[in-house]
Image (tube, rainbow, N blue to C red):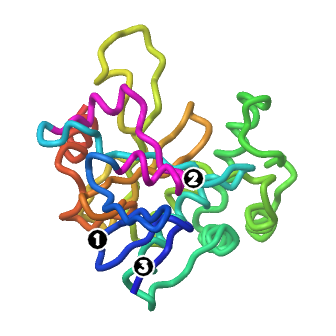
Amino acid sequence: MNYYLTDCIFIKDNTTYYEENNKIKKVTKHNWHHYLYDYGWTKLNLGWKRRLKEKENKNSCFGVLECGSEGDCLFYVLSEALNSELLFNFDAKKHSVESLRSLAANEITDDNFDVILETYKLEYTENEDCFNGDWDPYAVETKEELRDVITDGSDFWGDHILLQLLQKKLEVNIIILNSDNNIETQNIDERFTIHPLASHDLSIHEKTIVIYYLDQFHFQLIGYFNGKRMVSIFKTDEIPKVLLDVYNKDCRN
């Protein structure tokens, strides 16, 4: 059975192919960036390509996917990764922006409400012009009101707080790659780093999603072409070794 990702890209027997003008070509580690571009996958920037360079692969197998914006980029990224499991497990739960917003909102409890709201108030007070979202935390008085703000739509942007709540609820590890720290150094290891939010034991959960944090503002999805298909949610033994090495080095620092 062929599972079509686009009009041209399909997966058969866990292997990706590109079909055009009645000709079928197998997608490989050498050409994935040419054919999967039709889905939206592009190569990572040069800095991360250098940090994640694999000796055995001349062509970087790490890709980045723009999943959506308008304040929902985090939820688009997570739903894209989670829904990729539907290719091989029809019983897997399908996720959407709305369902993930609702899931995150329901994680606001009596135990964490005060701390979370005070964090938002502090961020809003310190830099109102750069506050993510178009809502006023000082207008929120109860956990129900905060839940409503989260679920109502794009006025509330997905952020590091919701990411931590969803990480626990969905039982997935999240690794975040910073796009560029913009510090005055040519040292790639210092400019392109793992976000500190991701610093935890990856054995906590069986699955891991990797996210690209563009300009400390916008989330995109990271994938890895393993020779057969683009993987965007990894089992523990599927995480590329070079990524684990960078993760362990940055988290130690």
Start-end of magenta stretch: 32-54
Query: Which residue is tagged 1?
Result: 206
Instruction: Tell me if residue 44 is in the magenta stretch.
Output: yes
147 up-or-down from 134: above or below: below
240 up-or-down from 166: above or below: above
Q: Which amino acid is tagged 3?
A: Leu
Q: Residue furthest bottom?
A: 91
Q: CA distance from mark 3 to mark 1?
A: 18 Å
Q: How many marks?
A: 3
Q: Kindly state the secondary structure of the residue where label 1 is placed.
A: loop
Q: Nearer the viewer, mark 2 or mark 3?
A: 3
How far across and down, in percent of the image, does residue 181 sit?
46, 23
Residue drawn at (36%, 9%) of the image: 185
Residue drawn at (69%, 38%) of the image: 122
Q: Confirm whether residue 110 shows in the render.
A: no
Residue drawn at (83%, 45%) of the image: 134
Tell me if mark 3 has few (under 14), some (14-19) or many (20+) residues whose alpha carbon lies within 10 angstroms of its own. Answer: few
Q: Kindly state the secondary structure of the residue where label 3 is placed.
A: helix
Q: Kindly state the secondary structure of the residue where label 2 is placed.
A: helix
Q: CA distance from mark 2 to mark 3?
A: 30 Å
Confirm or deny contact between disc 2 and disc 1 (CB under 8 A). no
47 up-or-down from 27: above or below: above
Query: Which residue is tagged 3?
Result: 87
Residue 161, numbered label: 2
Q: Quadrant of the N terminus?
A: bottom left
Residue drawn at (81%, 52%) of the image: 155
Please state which of residues 73 and 15 is positioned toward the viewer in this rendering. Answer: 15
